[in-house]
Image: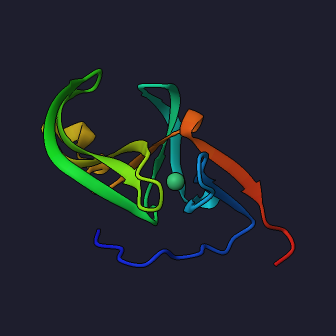
Amino acid sequence: MGYMHKVFLSGPEIYTCSSCGTHLALKNKIASKQYTGQYGRAYLFDEVANVRAGEADKRNMITGMHIVRDITCMECNNYVGWTYVTAFSPEQKFKEGKFILEKALICDILRDWD
Ligand SMILES: [Zn+2]
């Protein structure tokens, strides 16, 4: 992590923070839509931008024990999802280093003008 400056993503469709509009991820970077967060449907991304990660926390999830960090928008500090640090089960290892954004907390914007 360690994004010190806000970056602007360029792509046909971008997910932004729903409260301040900061760019968070490109729609074409979605790895999976089959996730559930605290607020319902959540998406798994290979990479996101403009977030800060909180303290590592051990959590027992539907898919087993994981060490995760909540991620917040670097602009407004709102919670938007989490990132997987460690997955203990071998079949969940692919999630390490990936990010979850909660659908209810992000907006989908079209940028077909550039
Ligand atoms: Zn924000």
106 over 113 or under it: above or below:
above
* Residue 66 locus on image (x, y percent): 18, 36
Picture quarter containing residue 38?
Answer: top left
From the viewer's perspective, tell me whether residue 112 is left or right of residue 64.
right
From the viewer's perspective, tell me whether residue 97 is left or right of residue 43.
left
Q: Is residue 87 visible?
A: no
From the viewer's perspective, tell me whether residue 37 is left or right of residue 62.
right
23 over 62 or under it: above or below:
below
* Residue 74 locus on image (x, y percent): 41, 61
From the viewer's perspective, tell me whether residue 62 is left or right of residue 26.
left
Q: Residue at x 59, y 47 (%)?
A: 19
Q: Residue at x 35, y 77 (%)?
A: 4
Q: Is residue 37 visible?
A: yes
User: Quarter of the image containing the N terminus?
Assistant: bottom left
Picture quarter containing residue 46?
Answer: bottom left
In terms of depth relative to the viewer, which is nearer, 36 or 107? Answer: 107
Q: Residue at x 84, y 68 (%)?
A: 112
* Residue at the limit of the structure toward the front, as seen here: 76
Q: Residue at x 12, y 38 (%)?
A: 88
* Residue 69 locus on image (x, y percent): 24, 46
* Residue 42 locus on image (x, y percent): 50, 35
User: Quarter of the image containing the C terminus?
Assistant: bottom right
16 over 11 or under it: above or below:
above
* Residue at the limit of the structure toward the right, as seen here: 113
Numbered label tally: 0
Q: How is the image coloured?
A: rainbow
